[in-house]
Amino acid sequence: MRSENEPDGQPRSFIEEARRRQIIAAAVEVISEFGYGNASLARIAKHAGISKGVISYHFDGKDDLMTQLVIQLYVSGAEYMTPIIGAAPGWRGKVLAYIESNLEFIAANKRYVAAMTDVVVNLRDAEGKSRFVNVESAREILRPIADMLREGQREGEFGDFDPILMAKSIRDAIDGTGGRVINEPDFDARAYAAHVCRIFDLATGKPGE
């Protein structure tokens, strides 16, 4: 496996990064069609039109490839959402932008989301514990939205509520969308996003506003 950097400390080249993304994309397609259990490196290599050795050059086995698949989706989501949130005015605007942009990203990447969900459910460490479903991971996912809610309260834009509980409620509403986008052909993600934004706009607002 190639490390994040070359031996001389230089980052991976554009070509190497493109190859890694190609392999991850092939893994997404294979998982979507055959499921996590049948997504062997040989099958992924065949789908990508490369040798299994090329995958081994870039990833330290199936577990590493699957881990990077999940990480890549989170990175891509952050790259999409961050400028949208940053451009929104005020903390209320940023919270609503967080919800809307996250739901838009899920709807636009439903095949990838389905594959990632399969990986998260199935990937285990050496002790048989979930690689991603743990307390620390949950805290990291909650932190951005919880911080925005706290700042909004501190600056008087929001009412009185527990920011952690509100953040969990927002995340549950967002994360539950993945299954609907995947399983409901007529699911209207845009209408659902507007609906969820209205709910949490009311829930976080000051009484009487």
Image (tube, rainbow, N blue to C red):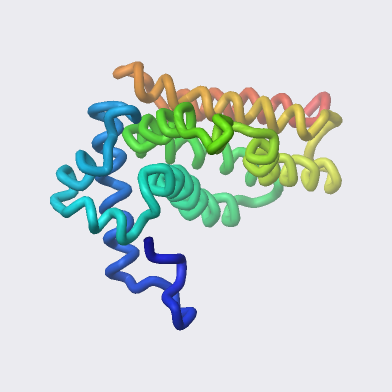
Q: Nearest the camera: 57 or 94?
A: 57
Q: Is 170 rendered above or below residue 44? A: above
Identify the residue at image location x=17%, y=53%. 51
Number of on-image labels: 0
Decide which of 167, 117 is in the foreground and name it: 117
Residue 96 x %, y %: 60, 38
Quick check: 2 left or right of 100?
A: left
Q: Position of residue 144 (x, y in %)?
A: 67, 46
Query: Residue visible at 44% across and 78% down?
Result: 7
Residue 33 seen in render: yes
- Front residue of 103 and 38: 38
Quadrant assignment for the C terminus: top right
- Regarding residue 73, the answer to whether it shows in the image is no
**For residue 108, what is the image quadrant?**
top left
Task: Tell me the quadrant of the picture where the N terminus can be found.
Answer: bottom left
Residue at the location (22% across, 51% down)?
52
Q: Position of residue 152 (x, y in %)?
A: 78, 44
> Residue 142, relative to residue 203: is it above or below?
below
| 151 is higher (above) or lower (below) than 56 | above
Asked which quadrant contains residue 34, the reply is top left
Q: Position of residue 154 (x, y in %)?
A: 85, 46
Q: Quadrant of residue 167?
A: top right
Left/right of residue 183 with respect to residue 46 in the rendered view: right
Residue drawn at x 33%, y 28% as measured from the top left: 37
- In the image as oriented, which residue stretches furthest toward the bottom? 8
